Amino acid sequence: MTNDGLIPGAAGLHLVDGLPLLRPDEQVFSAMLDGWRNQQLARNLAFGTIDGRENTVRAFARHADAFPWRWTPLMVDEWCGDLRAVHHLKRSTLRNYQEAVRSFCSYITDPAYGWPAECEQRFGTHPVQVCHEWNTAVHVAEAEADAGKRAFTRQELQAFFDHADEQVDRVREAGRKGWLPIFRDGVLFKTAYAFGLRRNEARMLDVVDFGRNPDGSEFGEYGVLYVRHGKAQKGSPPKRRSVLTVWPWAAEILEQWDTEVRPLFATAEAGALWPSERGPRIGFSQINTRFAAYRDALGLDRALDFHSFRRSYVTHLIEGGWDARFVQEQVGHEHASTTSIYTCVSSDFRTRTLRRALDATLDAALNPSRRKR
């Protein structure tokens, strides 16, 4: 609440009473977006979330060719039909777009912000909510990702990492420049798998994010990874977590990278674990391009993406007999059901699990005395 009694996003904060506007339609719409932005900032939403929502509302306004006080549910139907049939948007993306428009309409139709009265005075009409349960997508499934997305098999993962190492050797033996970024990307991919990291979590790592694990002295300075840029919940800062090192080879490659190779980058002093040749930190496009090049060169399934490293981490730990609760804490899932979605255990693992259960049942039936004890 401001000193004059107005709340963030109120029309009175963005339009001066009695002042004629040169382009009233455009200026009022722009003021609405500014007010909505202030409201979302007051809710502590991330800047990226706010910018994305604003872009979505602008895109809907362009498609509808109308300003918010003229919007109707039919315009939403036509827009969503175009997004599904022509642009082939994913279900989750379409639902997020609809939610952005719904949120904006909730804001401009709330009498507390004064926009209904302002539009009635200037345009003789007022905005209404155009997104309802009967014309928007409903979130009915825990996992809305493409069903084709999956984890690497162990053979695929080994082939991918071997190919990454071969590229370094090939470039160095040819006496060509460029082996440093190739080496960096290979270690980045291995680290993402070794700690079950999301893409941004891996990209934003700094050298100081590793530490000793008192109960894992064999890992040296790389016994635990402190993730500072975890996936944030709505209206919250990035979620932090610590990930314990579970495989000795992960500590070995990180020590080699940090002590021998990384210092060769001119931008290494900035402290980022993955420096770029021209900047302090590698970009998303570099990561995506390299990953796709390796995957396609090996002829692997195009359903495999960077997130498949994280799926593989969960799957391989579960197959290796690690406790499910431990795995859940390692990857930072709030609910065990989320971790179960990531688990893509092989048919061989399920067969072995079934065989052990059947053997135990048969042994108990044939040896009643042992069962009694």
Image (cartoon, grey):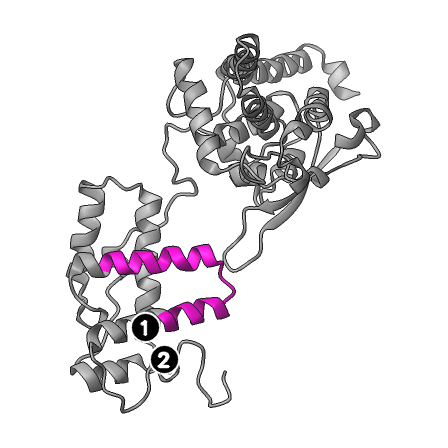
- Is the residue marked by circle 2 packed among few (<14), some (14-19), or many (20+) residues within 10 Å? some
Q: Given the image, on which type of amino acid does mark 1 rest?
A: Met
Q: Are marks 2 and 1 in contact (CB under 8 Å)?
A: yes
**Which badge, 2 or 1, comes first in the chain's sequence?**
2
Q: Would you say the magenta stretch is mainly helix, strand or loop?
A: helix
Question: Based on the displayed image, in which of its 4 quarters is residue 75 positioned?
Answer: bottom left
Q: Is residue 74 magenta?
A: no
* Position in image of residue 72 (x %, y %): 17, 65
In-image side of 250 versus 288 (left or right): right
Q: Is residue 53 above or below residue 105?
A: above
Q: CA distance from mark 2 to mark 1?
A: 8 Å
Q: Give the left or right position of residue 181, taking residue 83 as reference.
A: right
Residue at horizontal 42%, vertical 60%?
Answer: 50
Of the residues shown, which amino acid type is indicated by label 2? His
Residue at the image point whose x is 44% and y is 31% from the top: 288
Q: Quickly name the residue at label 2.
A: 14
Magenta-tinted stretch = 34-60
Residue 164 visible here: yes
Q: Is residue 150 visible?
A: no
Q: Is residue 58 magenta?
A: yes
Residue bearing mark 1:
32
Q: In this picture, is 287 found above or below 167?
A: below
Q: Where is residue 297 shown, x and y percent of the image?
A: 41, 14
